[in-house]
Image (tube, rainbow, N blue to C red):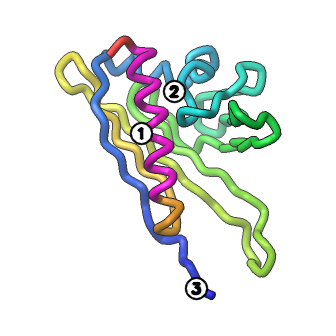
Amino acid sequence: MTNTVANKELVITRIFDAPRELVYQAFVDPDQIAQWFGPVGFSVPRDTIDIDARTGGHQRMVMVSDDDPNMTSPVDARFTEVIENELLVGAEEWDPTPGEAEPVAMYMRLEFHDEGDKTRIVLRQGPYTEEVEGMAREGWNSSFTKLDNLLGS
């Protein structure tokens, strides 16, 4: 059995053809999140989304498989730093898996930068194992394609 260590950081940089304020709103407005969040094949029902976008606030939602509604992935994160239209930093803890003594903590940092009349975002998230980092990258890129469509890019 291979001992996999979760020490890989996912980093994605992407440019959206929309002003920074509109891109930021797409990450904090529950109505918009319901339209784009989750990779193709998953959705986030609007009634599962609860966001308090401030330092100490939270982000809660449930991704649901379109093919099997019993397959869900809940998100229950706490914002540790928020600068409107510039930065969202958060963390989420899961109960330890059998054999682990500590809860598993995942962080995410999302920066919003002006790029002319467009917006460059830099997403950092982890830690991941190598295998899971690849799946997370695919998921985010799929979600961002849906966000491009929402923003009219």
Residue 5, quarter of the rendered image? bottom right
- Up/down of 147 relative to 97, above or below: above
Task: Say whether residue 117 is left or right of residue 145.
Answer: left
Amino acid beneath label 3: Thr
Amino acid beneath label 1: Asn
Q: Residue at x 65, y 43 (%)?
A: 78
Q: Residue at x 63, y 20 (%)?
A: 30
SS assignment at label 1:
helix
Q: Residue at x 82, y 39 (%)?
A: 70
Tag in front: 1 or 2: 1
Magenta-colored span: 134-151
Quadrant assignment for the C terminus:
top left
* Residue 149 is inside the magenta segment: yes
Taking the image as drawn, is residue 60 in sight? no
Label 3: few (<14), some or many (≥20) within 10 Å? few
Task: Work out whether mark 3 precedes mark 1 in sequence or the reverse, and give the earlier one.
Answer: 3
Which numbered disc covers residue 141? 1
* Residue assigned mark 2: 27
Marks 3 and 2: CB-CB under 8 Å?
no
SS assignment at label 3:
loop
Looking at the image, the residue that sits furthest to the front is 67
Residue 34, quarter of the rendered image? top right
Instruction: Quote the CA–CA distance across marks 3 and 1.
Output: 28 Å
Instruction: Quote the CA–CA distance across marks 1 and 2.
Output: 15 Å
- Tell me where residue 16 appears, x and y as whole percent: 31, 25
* Residue assigned mark 3: 2
Label 2: few (<14), some or many (≥20) within 10 Å? some
Instruction: Quote the CA–CA distance across marks 3 and 2.
Output: 37 Å
